[in-house]
Every structure is written in structure tokens, then in C-alpha cells.
Image (tube, rainbow, N blue to C red):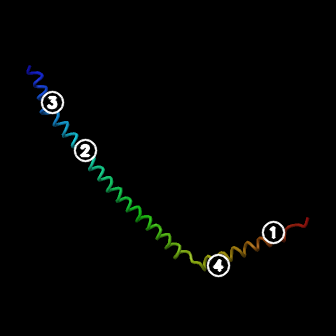
């Protein structure tokens, strides 16, 4: 009779509290992991927004400072003049049919 009683006592005194403790530990670790993941996600989202804003500001700075409107107009005039000269040469060299 001491066999089953010892087994029941072992399950009641040791196994059930150990399993309950492991369940509680797993539950708590899962909650901590979820909280940590959420805080990291919020941090990454904030960094992403900051990077996008910085990139937009940089693009605007490049557009304002590195390419000026008068320079673009000068290049456009020169390209147009060259294209008109090429067109005139092509029209001049076309034999009459």
C-alpha cells in the first residue's frame, strides 16, 4: 500500500507545483517578450519616421543648393540650339526625290 500512496504524494507534493511553476514562468516570459517586442517596434517605427524625414530634407537641400534654375535654363538653351543645328543639317542634306 505504500507504493500508490507514495506515488500520489509525489504527484501532489512535487509534480503539480513544479508544472504549475513552469506554466507560470512560461506565461510571464511570454508577456515580457511581447512587451519588449512592442517597445522595440515602437522605437524602430520612430527611427524609420526620422530617417524618412531626414531623407526628404536632404533631397530638398540637394534640389535647392546643387542645381540652380538659371543653370538649368542655360543648359536647356544650349541643348535646344544644338538640336536645331542638327535638324537644319539633316534638312539641308536630304536629297530631293
Q: Are marks 2 and 4 in contact (CB under 8 Å)?
A: no
> Residue tagged by mark 2?
27
Q: Nearer the viewer, mark 2 or mark 4?
A: 2
Check whether the beta carbons of the residues at disc 2 and disc 1 lie within 8 A of each other.
no
Residue farthest toward the top in the current orientation of the protein: 1
Q: Earlier in the sequence, mark 3 or mark 2?
A: 3
* Residue at which label 3 appears: 11
Which quadrant, please, contains the C terminus? Answer: bottom right
Say which of marks 3 and 1 sits in front: 3
Residue wearing tag 4: 74
Callout 2 secondary element: helix
User: Which residue corresponds to the image point at 12% horizontal and 33% vertical from the top-left?
Assistant: 13
Residue 95, horizontal then vertical, whole percent: 88, 66
The tag earlier along the polypeptide, 2 or 1, is 2
Residues packed near mark 3 inside 10 Å, few (<14), some (14 to 19) or many (20 plus): few
Residue 87 image-quadrant placement: bottom right
Q: Is residue 52 left or right of residue 89?
A: left
Residue at x 31% of width, y 56% of height: 39
Q: CA distance from mark 2 to mark 4?
A: 70 Å
Q: Position of residue 48 (x, y in %)?
A: 41, 61
If you read the primary sequence from the N terminus, does the residue marked by circle 2 or circle 4 appear first? 2
* In-front residue for pair 12/84: 12
Q: Position of residue 55 (x, y in %)?
A: 46, 66
Say which quarter of the image contains residue 70.
Answer: bottom right
Q: Secondary structure at mark 4?
A: helix
| The N terminus - image quarter | top left
The number of callouts visible is 4
Tell me if 18 is positioned left or right of 90 in this view.
Answer: left
5 sits left or right of 23 in the view: left
In primary-sequence order, the first of circles 3 and 1 is 3
Amino acid at each position: 500500500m505504500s507504493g500508490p500512496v507514495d506515488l500520489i504524494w509525489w504527484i501532489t507534493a512535487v509534480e503539480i507545483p513544479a508544472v504549475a511553476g513552469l506554466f507560470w514562468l512560461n506565461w510571464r516570459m511570454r508577456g515580457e517578450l511581447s512587451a519588449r517586442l512592442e517597445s522595440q517596434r515602437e522605437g524602430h517605427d520612430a527611427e524609420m519616421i526620422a530617417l524618412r524625414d531626414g531623407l526628404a530634407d536632404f533631397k530638398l537641400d540637394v534640389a535647392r543648393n546643387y542645381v540652380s534654375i538659371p543653370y538649368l535654363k542655360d543648359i536647356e538653351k544650349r541643348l535646344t540650339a544644338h538640336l536645331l543645328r542638327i535638324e537644319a543639317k539633316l534638312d539641308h542634306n536630304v536629297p530631293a526625290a
